[in-house]
Amino acid sequence: MDVMHERVAGLDVHKETVVACVRIMAGRKAHRECRTFDTTTFGLEALLTWLTESACTHVAMEATGVYWKPVWNILSDGTFELTLANAAHIKNVPGRKTDMNDAMWIADLLSCGLIKASFVPEQEIQQLRSLLRARKQLYARADQPRPADSEAIRRLIERGLAGETDVKTAEQRRKSERESVTALTRNNITAGDPQRQLVDVACASLL
């Protein structure tokens, strides 16, 4: 197969790790190097640094569940072209060798221009979609008891707002939760921002 991109990287994304393979052409021979990174912010920033230092021009990963999203968000700051590939499409391309891991195979396909990019909306659109899903779920559970929601918000308050966890009654606790979540989510959202309305709806559902 003809090589279209000489310096590429393929990423195999998992819940806790990312296996990365950098593929660089040296004459007619491909040199590959694989490394594993944690999916923590520190680990993904180290991955970004390695890809940049390797002078990769193109990087591709599979759309694996939701695990690709934090990887995409950090790597989108890179100077290379970032591609999200459909996992089924990659598996159906013939010619894969048995001793290749997923990252190596993605890198090989990318170097030959055989990966069709999936559409990835801008981060603001992704955030709005997440808020809409949360809003739908909150409305669906509006008349049901929500101990799990209350406990999750309490933990959030404990981590972010000191002094807000000593409320005693259920009514006081719900009011404290609503005010705390409102303060946390509105911090960087202006009044005219479309996200503000969704935040208001979500917070009101805690009443």
Image (cartoon, helix red, strand yellow):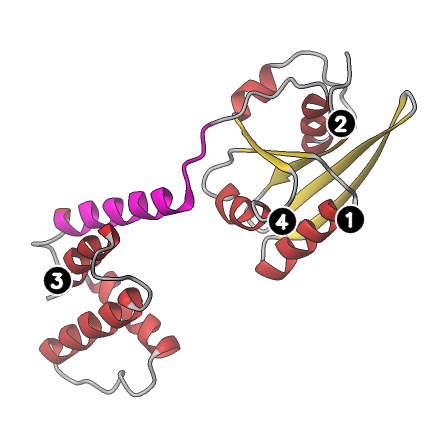
- Percent of width and height locating residue 132: 24, 45
Separation of marks 3 and 2 at Cα, in angstroms:
52 Å
Residue for badge 4: 17
Q: Earlier in the sequence, mark 3 or mark 4?
A: 4
Residue for badge 1: 53
State the extent of the magenta-drawn residues as a range.
119-139
Q: Earlier in the sequence, mark 1 or mark 4?
A: 4
Which labelled disc corresponds to residue 204?
3
Separation of marks 1 and 2 at Cα, in angstroms:
24 Å
- Percent of width and height locating residue 47: 68, 50
Q: Earlier in the sequence, mark 3 or mark 2?
A: 2
Q: Secondary structure at mark 2?
A: loop
Q: Label 3: few (<14), some or many (≥20) within 10 Å?
A: some
Q: Is residue 137 magenta?
A: yes
Quadrant for the N terminus in the image: top right
Q: Secondary structure at mark 1?
A: helix
- Percent of width and height locating residue 143: 7, 54
Q: Secondary structure at mark 3?
A: helix
